[in-house]
Amino acid sequence: QVLQFGGGPVQAGGSMRLSCTLSGRPLGNYHMGWFRQAPGKERLFVAVISRDGDTTYNTDSVKGRFTVSRDDAKSTLYLQMNSLQAQDTAAYYCAAKFAYTSRAPTGALEYDDWGPGTLVTVSA
């Protein structure tokens, strides 16, 4: 089970941190990704961090504003979101991919387990 925490309303220009844990499984065995889905739109990749934490990658629209990180000792994944904009409004999903290989995927179909999503609403 993938558990998510955080989300809610925030003003444009503000910051918010989302977090995610895996229930009953060590986070260190998984590549972890964040995706988001705006109302009426498809689910899109936001950020990924490799199992060992050495590789991170963000989609262009959030580069310089969002940071993905992990604390395996706490079995927790984070998404720090700064300088939030109205277009960041979406449901945000945490996803886990067992690390059979070293490649941390960016495609939603490659992930095995998903969190329930948490809504982030950015108001102007």
Image (tube, rainbow, N blue to C red):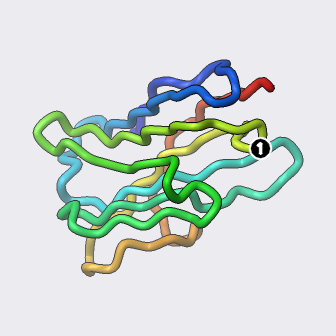
Which residue in the rendered view is the most extreme toward the left?
A: 73
Is 104 positioned to the left or the right of 58 in the image? left
Q: In this view of the protein, which residue sits in the foreground, 106 or 66?
A: 66
The N terminus, quarter of image: top left
Label 1 sits on a secondary structure element that is helix
Is 20 positioned to the left or the right of 87 in the image? left
Question: For the residue carrying disc 1, how many other residues have a C-alpha within 10 Å: few (<14), some (14-19), or many (20+)?
Answer: few
Residue at x-position 70% and y-position 56%: 43
Q: Quadrant of residue 24?
A: top left
The C terminus, quarter of image: top right
Q: Position of residue 32 (x, y in %)?
A: 37, 56
Q: Position of residue 17 (x, y in %)?
A: 44, 30
Q: Position of residue 10 (x, y in %)?
A: 65, 21
* On screen, residue 6 above or below 116: above
Residue at x-position 64% and y-position 49%: 36
Q: Quadrant of residue 73?
A: top left
Residue under pointer 1: 87
Residue at x-position 49% and y-position 54%: 64
Residue at x-position 48% and y-position 58%: 47
Q: In this view of the protein, which residue sits in the foreground, 37 or 89?
A: 89
